[in-house]
Every structure is written in structure tokens, then in C-alpha cells.
Image (tube, rainbow, N blue to C red):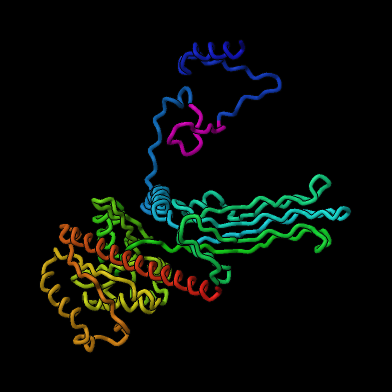
């Protein structure tokens, strides 16, 4: 009833502006009126400080005093202070936009402590729980960081032995879902595990033994250590090229991905994933890797952070600007042929196995003037590279050149060659899959023959 009465009264209330203002109480014996000079805080949206009391009588009729002129320096400072919050908001927006990708995370893991033993009856305490890393699709390292800000994972403690249960139960395991393509490293950088397929598990910290006769019925503490999760993207095709070669534009043309695209270098500052969709529902994943620079193999320009994502791509797609490349006015201009050699050199110096991957070459920006002439010259150089290597510096020449399955001239601006490139990617991926299946069948056949020979020898 009281609640209903309150609702009825609230529903019949008039707006605050229609309510009569209560009369001011006269100052009592123990009260003194507020001095007129006491400031009142402003409640207006733009109020930035105290508001002076309302004047009365002749003071109210007096004209306001003209505002003193503000010096130019003070005015500039005020404008800068007013613009500061906008700059902060802009910075936060950029942080939200580019700070969603994390490929390295440091965690603390600890197995559970074992349960107490029961000396009088020889009871054995339960073993402590274990900490497991479980590979799961649609999981990111950022999800782990947001969900567990402390980045600490501790398994449950084993149950103590008792008269009712001499053998204590094992403590609860702690499972941490991690994305595919994770390498588990110790704090010193040594790799101790790898998770590449959904459902794979890795024991990160083992639980301690329960109290028993061997431990004088005193439980053991669980294993504890600091591990680092290093993510390397798993994709069918990896886009490799220097900055501003058009990799992001190409990814947006061949897939539904929407990477950041602009006419300046280093637009892509984090890897982007996209999928090529074919008419027969075949899907091929493509990774747009941030642009490399000369010296990336030596970690120049965060080279290792970008090159590591090339390791788990099945094939490479080099994207080269037909008009050449120059990072800045302080760096030397490189032709398209020199660009191909430098990219090969960077991959080779980082890890030689990368040069053995199947590779395609996309020659971009064919809509530019003189592109046809530059393409003819580049094709001559790629067909007989030995005839032109003596014109280049020795440090630019790789030990082994990449053998491209196909060389496709394209233009992400006009769409020229995009469909042909998608067909070449599909053909190359299918050929590699068939080759892998053939090798797998040969291995299975060899194992079967070996097992039959062993059975014949035993008999």
C-alpha cells in the first residue's frame, strides 16, 4: 500500500517549474544569514566556476563593466586548453581502432597444491589441479587480457585425506582457451609447446602431489612459472611487400575484409585477415602483413614482429609497385626488380625456409602511366635475372631467388587482373593440397608395409 501511494503521488506531481518556491526562513537565534559575497556554484552546462550572487536595487540597474581585452598570448593558450580534450578523445579513438590486436601475452600459471595426508590411517591427499592451454577457434589474446586483467591462472587444491575418504580427490583443473597458432615460450624465450589445431592441449603447470608416506604426509606445492604466448597467424596466403605497395587495397578487393587504406606508408600497423569466397563455397584465408623495410630481418622497424606471421602461411603472395618504391627522400629509390630481390633477401635472412614456400607475384598499379613499358622491362629481368645482377649492389642479391608460379599484373584501382589473381591463388592452393595428400598417402603406405614386415618377422 505504501508503495502504491508513493507511485500515485509521483504520478500526480507537477513539473518542478510549477512548484511554489518555499519561503525563506528568517535567521534564528543560532543562525546567521549567508554573507552576500559567498559564491554559489553554477549549475549551467557551460558553467566553469563560481557564480556571483544576484544583485538588487541600484546595483542591479548599473550597467555591466566592459570586459578587459585579452592578450593574444593568453587567448592562444586558452584556445590550446580548449582543444586539449578533443586531442585526448582523438587519441583514445586511435587507440581503440589500432589497439585491438595482440600477438604477445605474458601469463603467470601455477598448479594446485596437493591435499594433506592422513598419517594415522595412511591416507593419501589428492593431487593438485593442473593448468592447461586449450586451442579454440574464435578466441584472441585480447579476450584473455580483457577477461583476466591480472593474467594469473591458478588450479584448484587437492582434497585432504579423511576417515570417510582416505584417497583425496584431485583439485580442479584450470583450462585457458587460447587461439590457434600459439607458441608457448618460457620467460627466457625457449619454446616449450605449440598449439595449431582446435582441441589441442598443452600442460602449462602441473599440480603438486598429495601428502603420502613418501612425503611424510605433507602435500607438495604445484609447479609455477611465467610463460609467454606468442601468436603467429595461420593463413593459406600471406601478402608480403614494402609499404604503400597496395596490399590492403588488394585484400579489400579479393575478400570482404575492410582494412585501413590511405595514400601513405605504414597504413597497416597490424595484421589483417580476410577470406576469398569462391562460387563453389571454397574459402581461402589471406593475411595482410604490415609493410617491411630494408633491414627487417635485423628487427629494423619491428621487422621480427611482422615477419613471424609469414612463418605459418602456406604460400606467399608478393605485391610489388610497378613504378618502384622509395620510403622517404632520405632513402634510395628502388625499381620493381630491385624490390623483388630485396623482399627475397629479407625473407632469406630472417629464415631460409621462407624462400622455399610456394610464391606468386602480383605487380600492382598497372593503371599508372608508363606501366606497360615498366612491365616489359621487369619481365625481361625476372626471366633472366643473372644478366642484371652485376648492376646491383652485392648486399641486395639473395643467395637463392624465389621461383614464382605465376606473375599477374593487376590494378586495385581499376580492378584489372583481380579475377585472374583469385583463380591463380585457387589453383596454387589446390595443387599444394593435392601434393600434401599424396605425401600423406605415401607415409601411411610406408607405415603399413613396415608393420606387415614386423609381423612376418615375429611369426
**Closest to the observer, 264 or 211:** 211
Rendered view: 389 above or below 239: below
Q: Residue furthest front?
A: 459
**Closest to the observer, 97 or 232:** 232
Q: Position of residue 148 (x, y in %)?
A: 56, 51
Apparent side of residue 416 relative to residue 244 in the rendered image (left or right): left
Apparent side of residue 117 relative to residue 231 in the rendered image (left or right): right
Q: Residue placed at 34% from the left, 75% from the top?
A: 356
Q: Residue furthest bottom?
A: 390
**Quadrant of the image containing the C terminus:** bottom right
Q: Is residue 43 magenta?
A: yes
Q: Is residue 8 magenta?
A: no
**Quadrant of the image containing the N terminus:** top right
Apparent side of residue 419 relative to residue 438 in the rendered image (left or right): left
Q: Is residue 78 visible?
A: no
Q: Position of residue 286 (x, y in %)?
A: 32, 60
Apparent side of residue 23 relative to residue 382 in the rendered image (left or right): right
Q: Position of residue 134 (x, y in %)?
A: 53, 55
Q: Main secondary structure of the magenta part?
A: loop
Q: How many marks?
A: 0
Q: Residue placed at 57% from the left, 68% from the top?
A: 186
Q: Is residue 206 visible?
A: yes
Rendered view: 261 above or below 360: above
Rendered view: 329 above or below 219: below
Q: Position of residue 153 (x, y in %)?
A: 61, 55
Tell me which segment is drawn in magenta. 37-54
Amino acid at each position: 500500500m505504501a508503495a502504491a501511494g508513493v507511485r500515485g503521488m509521483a504520478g500526480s506531481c507537477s513539473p518542478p517549474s510549477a512548484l511554489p518556491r518555499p519561503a525563506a526562513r528568517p535567521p534564528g537565534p543560532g543562525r546567521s544569514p549567508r554573507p552576500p559575497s559567498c559564491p554559489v556554484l553554477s549549475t549551467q552546462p557551460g558553467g566553469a566556476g563560481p557564480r556571483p550572487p544576484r544583485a538588487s536595487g541600484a546595483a542591479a540597474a548599473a550597467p555591466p563593466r566592459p570586459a578587459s581585452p585579452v592578450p593574444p598570448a593568453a587567448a592562444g593558450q586558452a584556445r590550446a586548453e580548449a582543444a586539449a580534450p578533443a586531442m585526448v578523445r582523438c587519441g583514445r579513438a586511435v587507440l581503440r581502432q589500432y589497439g585491438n590486436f595482440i600477438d604477445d601475452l605474458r601469463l603467470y600459471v601455477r598448479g594446485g597444491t596437493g591435499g594433506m595426508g592422513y598419517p594415522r590411517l595412511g591416507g593419501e591427499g589428492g593431487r593438485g589441479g593442473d593448468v592447461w592451454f586449450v586451442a579454440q577457434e574464435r578466441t584472441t589474446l585480447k579476450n584473455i587480457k580483457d577477461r583476466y586483467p591480472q593474467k594469473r591462472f591458478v588450479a584448484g587444491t587437492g582434497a585432504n585425506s579423511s576417515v570417510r575418504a582416505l584417497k583425496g580427490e584431485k583439485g580442479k583443473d584450470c583450462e585457458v582457451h587460447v587461439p590457434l597458432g600459439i607458441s608457448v615460450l618460457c620467460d627466457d624465450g625457449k619454446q616449450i609447446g605449440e598449439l595449431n589445431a582446435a582441441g589441442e592441449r598443452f600442460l602449462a603447470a602441473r599440480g603438486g602431489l598429495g601428502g603420502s608416506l613418501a612425503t611424510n604426509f605433507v602435500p607438495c606445492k604445484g609447479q609455477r612459472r611465467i610463460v609467454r604466448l606468442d601468436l603467429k597467424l595461420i593463413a593459406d596466403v600471406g601478402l608480403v611487400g614494402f609499404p604503400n605497395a597496395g596490399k590492403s587495397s588488394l585484400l579489400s578487393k579479393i575478400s570482404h575484409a575492410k582494412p585501413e587504406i590511405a595514400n601513405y606508408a605504414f597504413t597497416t600497423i597490424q595484421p589483417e585477415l580476410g577470406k576469398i569466397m569462391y562460387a563453389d563455397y571454397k574459402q581461402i584465408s589471406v593475411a595482410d602483413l604490415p609493410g617491411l623495410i630494408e633491414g627487417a630481418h635485423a628487427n629494423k622497424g619491428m621487422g621480427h614482429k611482422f615477419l613471424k606471421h609469414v612463418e605459418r602461411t602456406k604460400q606467399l603472395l608478393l605485391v610489388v609497385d610497378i613504378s618502384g618504391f622509395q620510403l622517404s627522400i632520405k632513402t634510395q629509390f628502388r625499381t620493381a626488380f630491385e624490390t623483388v630481390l630485396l623482399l627475397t633477401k629479407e625473407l632469406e635472412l630472417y629464415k631460409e625456409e621462407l624462400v622455399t614456400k610456394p610464391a606468386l607475384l602480383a605487380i600492382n598499379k598497372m593503371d599508372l602511366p608508363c606501366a606497360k613499358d615498366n612491365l616489359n622491362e621487369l619481365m625481361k629481368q625476372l626471366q633472366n635475372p643473372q644478366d642484371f645482377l652485376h648492376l646491383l649492389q652485392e648486399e641486395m642479391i639473395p643467395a637463392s631467388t624465389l621461383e614464382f608460379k605465376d606473375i599477374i599484373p593487376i590494378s586495385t584501382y581499376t580492378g584489372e587482373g583481380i579475377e585472374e589473381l583469385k583463380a591463380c591463388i585457387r589453383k596454387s592452393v589446390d595443387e599444394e593440397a593435392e601434393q600434401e595428400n599424396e605425401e600423406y598417402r605415401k607415409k601411411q603406405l610406408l607405415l603399413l608395409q613396415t608393420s606387415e614386415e614386423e609381423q612376418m618377422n615375429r611369426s
